[in-house]
Amino acid sequence: MSKRRDDKTRRSSKKRKVALVEEYDSDDEYEHVRDPQVDKSRSCPYLDTINRSVLDFDFEKLCSVSLSHLNVYACLVCGKYFQGRGQKSHAYTHSVQINHRVFLNLHTLKFYCLPDNYQIIDSSLEDITYVLKPTFTPELISQLNTNVKLFRAYDGTTYLPGIVGLNNIKANDYCNVLLHAFVHVVALRDYFLEEQNYINIKLKPGIIIGLLAQRFGELNRKMWNPRNFKAHVSPHEMLQSVVLCSKKRFQITEQGDPVEFLAWFLNALHASLGGTKKRNSSVISQTFQGRMKVYSRKVIPLDISEEEERKKLMQTEEFKETSVETPFLFLTLDIPPAPLFKDELEQNIIPQVPLSSLLSKFDGVTEKEYKTYKDSTIKRFELTRLPPYLIICIKRFTKNTFFVEKNRTIVNFPVKNIDFKDMLSSDPAVIAKHPHTTYDLMANVVHDGEPGSGKGTYRVHVLHQASQKWYEIQDLHVADVLPQLITLSEAYIQIWELKKDNNVQPSNAGDSTGKVK
């Protein structure tokens, strides 16, 4: 009897449960019984407190209280960074004390309301996530070469993507000019705008140099972002990685030499992309690496004056001319010494020299003596391979025991159609590999002022590919400039782009009109 009663009670309880389920499964009941968290996520009442004018995602993602980089959130009301989301975290405390409610996880790009601790889902916040992490599709990248439209930032200023100022945090203008120049090299720009090109590169454990490529890619995307909140970018994270990867050789607080930074940066970026000594092992070697043949022979000491003895030494292996082929990432040009005397008006003479005379160093005929404390060596150079982008460094500074001297000689050069054919080897196999040898200038770094760290300033002229207009950029200052004024500047570093158009008429490497002086 007891078993039958138990069975009846079980059946009646099941019937009641089924009836309850059927009752709450109806559409009418679901309209009134909703998950309150889902409601708040879709209609957060605190979105109007977000202040986009104070948001700045260019700085290092560290908690402003604990200085930790783990699980960092940005307060979208005041722009400060805080760690965590739990009840004992700094972000939770900030939300309770200051009554700032909306936060963004800088890693997952999700929005949260604190202290209520629910996720906010709203399409109007998409512009904030895009500023934090801009993304570029192949279609957007292809449009950069043709887009001449001005874009308006959130603060009301208009700007061209790519032509934006960089903050000078203290004395990092020597880095800023090269970063501006490199983001306008089309091959580098297109490669780093797509994060998938390098995000999966694996290096050996413990190698921190891989951070450099990630930071340079982030800076590249921020400078070309058409939806910025402001018309300038801070390279803080990029420069922090430079200080870290160079082991404090290059500092934010102390002005350095752009040529030294150029040599280190190209090789470090090549290594961070997994590059090796093999040709075309990274986008750096594909873009900037050329090859040259170096001929060298030792000079017979002056104390050996007898002709016969000198002839015998010339036949020995030690004094015979040897040649070796070596890669290069940039070429260094030597300026002739400036005159010591003043003119009749008691003013210093600023001489001018055509670029062609400086490039004769690499024609395979011109010889130069290199002295050491032991002996002297005479060398001559000829190019065997021209890169798609040729970097030229004009040696303006000489150091002696006491101080640094600057040569203010003006180098005359055309900004278009300079032919480097005369610098190539006469070998038919080399000539056959170079159907195009004409280059156009696309970046020009200038040093103004006195020599020495902190005494002068650096600025850069860059060519905007889409509009074919020249712009002068010095930290946050951006202005358009006439190409005729570029040739009058004290050029220090130049980047030339190879042109593959057969209709161009090459100019000599002389002044801005193409005439050799």
Image (cartoon, rainbow, N blue to C red):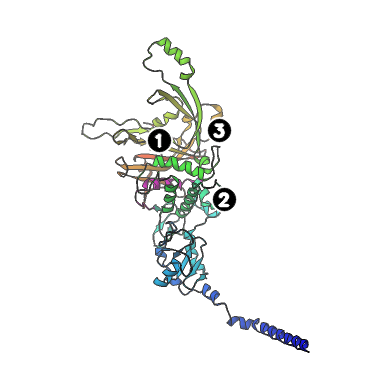
Q: Residue at x 61, y 81 (%)?
A: 30
Residue type of the residue flagged with mark 1: Gly
Quarter of image, res 516: top left
Q: Residue at x 38, y 14 (%)?
A: 304
Residue type of the residue flagged with mark 2: Asn
Q: Position of residue 336 (x, y in %)?
A: 34, 30
Q: Which residues are magenta?
A: 166-187
Of 108 and 421, nearer the camera is 108
Q: Quick check: 481 above or below 434?
A: below
Q: Which residue has dot 3 on it?
A: 433
CA gap, disc 2 and disc 1: 46 Å
Task: Tell me, yes or no, whether the highlighted magenta stretch contains residue 429.
Answer: no
Residue type of the residue flagged with mark 3: Lys
Q: Position of residue 298 (x, y in %)?
A: 43, 21
Disc 2 versus disc 1: nearer the observer = 2
Q: Which residue has dot 1 on it?
A: 514
Q: Quick check: 172 above or below 108?
A: above
